[in-house]
Image (cartoon, rainbow, N blue to C red):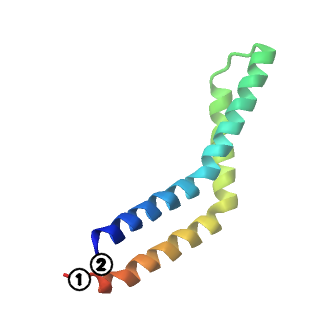
Amino acid sequence: MGTGYFVQLCVQTLWIIFILSLPTVIAASVIGIIISLIQAITQLQDQTLPFLLKIIAVFATLALTYHWMGTTIINFSSIIFEMIPKVNG
């Protein structure tokens, strides 16, 4: 196994990290934008409201996608562990 293979493995790892973190980042961003628009319209300047709603949105997103995330991580980990004996020296 050459260095190109390990570079490809690192790229694949970064893509998996990106894909797994995307739902929570999107949920927090969408909630943040919506709450910011509502605060701008109503001139409400409470700082805890967006933070609390973002936390709730992130927890809800994680609760809805934990099975998919766990399956993805376990599958990728098993692929990595199957490759360990193939590494030369």
Which residue, as the protein is rendered here, is positioned at the far bottom? 85
Residue 74 position, x and y percent, is 51, 74
Amino acid marked by disc 1 = Asn
Q: Is residue 61 left or right of residue 8?
A: right
Task: Identify the disc placed on residue 1.
Answer: 2
Q: Residue at x 53, y 54 (%)?
A: 18
Compared to 63, does 46 lie above or below?
above
Mark 2, Cα crowd under 10 Å, few <14 / some 14-19 / many 20+, is few
Residue 55 position, x and y percent, is 63, 41
Q: Mark 1–mark 2 contact, CB under 8 Å?
A: yes
Residue 81 position, x and y percent, is 38, 80
Task: Identify the disc placed on residue 35.
Answer: none
Q: Residue at x 80, y 16 (%)?
A: 42
Compared to 87, does 7 lie above or below?
above
Q: Quadrant of residue 89?
A: bottom left
Real-space Cα separation, disc 1 to disc 2, in angstroms: 7 Å
Reading the image, the residue beneath label 1 is 88
Q: Is residue 42 left or right of residue 25?
A: right
Front-most of residues 60 and 1 = 1
Mark 1, Cα crowd under 10 Å, few <14 / some 14-19 / many 20+, is few
Residue 15 position, x and y percent, is 51, 59
Q: Give the secondary structure at mark 2.
A: loop
Amino acid marked by disc 2 = Met
Q: Quadrant of residue 83?
A: bottom left
